[in-house]
Image (cartoon, rainbow, N blue to C red):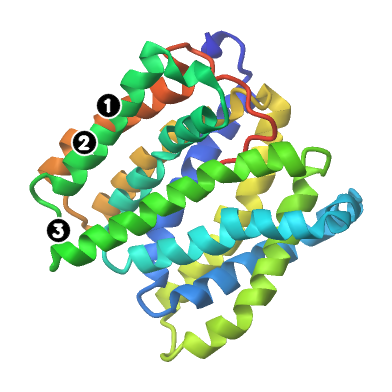
Amino acid sequence: MVATTVSARGWLLYGAMAVLWGIPYLFIKEAVDSYSPAAIVAGRTLLGALILLPLALHRRALGPALRLWPWVLAFGAIEMAGPFLLLGHAEQTLSSGLTGLLVATVPLFAAIISLLRGDRGVLSPARAIGLGVGFAGVAVIVLGPGLAVADPRDALWAVGQVLLVAVLYAIAPFLIATKLKDVPSLGTITLSLLMIGIAYLPFGLLTQHEVPTVRSTVSLVALGILCTAVAFLGFFALIREVGPVRAPLFTYVNPVVAILLGVVILGEPLSPGLLLGFPLVIVGCWLAATGGRLRRRPIANELPIV
């Protein structure tokens, strides 16, 4: 059991990561109130890169990443450039809690990708049940009663964007495991953030048509500092403390944090569909990722969802 082997420091890091990667959806929701999605991507990635860059230089982690910069850029596009922009667009329509829960479907898509890559282990009865239950939960949330949006078509489009984010997040670790397995994670993350931030900066400036509010600006800064730089440092520390297999277990708590913050701080409604679908998604993801075991199967250089 995890509880008998994880130290107090490990549990503290678990709690910190559950919050640090449970709150981005709240901050994105606040930031899109007066920042364009492209400006949010540029600001978040550049802030994160500037904070991580000195540490990456000190640990000499950038050299190996620079030698494989095309693959690092591809990883950044899949893990950051696409998802961060899609989340900004989606949260102009969806609640932050619903967005966080839909992103939690990553293990479902990771299981499907593993199957397509020839891993027949995902065909076990428990994993198959997990896939069915998880996607049934998504259907209940999206098609069930109480989805608080003005236009159902806009809602379906936004849900599709978030599910695409989940697909991209599921693909990224496979790229790390096959093309960047010998590159330090800190170097990959820092260089990715820097390249994506520079690439998005002109688009962010061109699409920013209003003066940002203080509240949106604080949220954007929090995204860059807390949910990007500090969160990645915390995740690396958690990996060192409990190992790469158990480190991502906190991701099952992230949607709970996202939903609670949305309800308490933003006053977002708890729709009947969300209440019914939430446990189905979480249970389905757990079964799809673990096959019903208490420990996840190891995935090389596994990365979180942010």
The amino acid at mark 1 is Val
Q: Is residue 58 visible?
A: yes
Q: Which residue is mark 2?
A: 277
- Expressed as whole percent of the image width and height from the top left, the position of residue 85 reads 48, 66
What's the residue at 68%, 24% (across, down)?
243
**C-alpha distance separating marks 1 and 2:** 9 Å
The amino acid at mark 2 is Gly
- Expressed as whole percent of the image width and height from the top left, the position of residue 62 reads 86, 55
Q: Report the side of 30 relative to 226 (left or right).
A: left
For disc 3, the neighbor class at 10 Å (few under 14, some 14 to 19, many from 20) is some
The amino acid at mark 3 is Ala
What's the residue at 32%, 55% (across, down)?
160
Q: Is residue 255 above or below residue 65?
A: above
- Expressed as whole percent of the image width and height from the top left, the position of residue 112 reads 45, 33
Mark 3 vs 1, N-terminal side: 1
Q: Which residue is mark 3?
A: 148
Which image quarter: residue 178?
A: top right
Q: Report the side of 110 relative to 131 (left or right).
A: right
Q: Which residue is mark 1?
A: 133
Q: Secondary structure at mark 2?
A: helix
- CB contact under 8 Å: marks 2 and 3: no
Which image quarter: residue 51?
A: bottom right
Q: Secondary structure at mark 1?
A: helix
**C-alpha distance separating marks 2 and 3:** 15 Å
- Expressed as whole percent of the image width and height from the top left, the position of residue 177 reads 70, 36
Between 228 and 279, the residue placed more toward the observer is 279
What's the residue at 56%, 41% (across, down)?
304
Disc marking residue 226: none
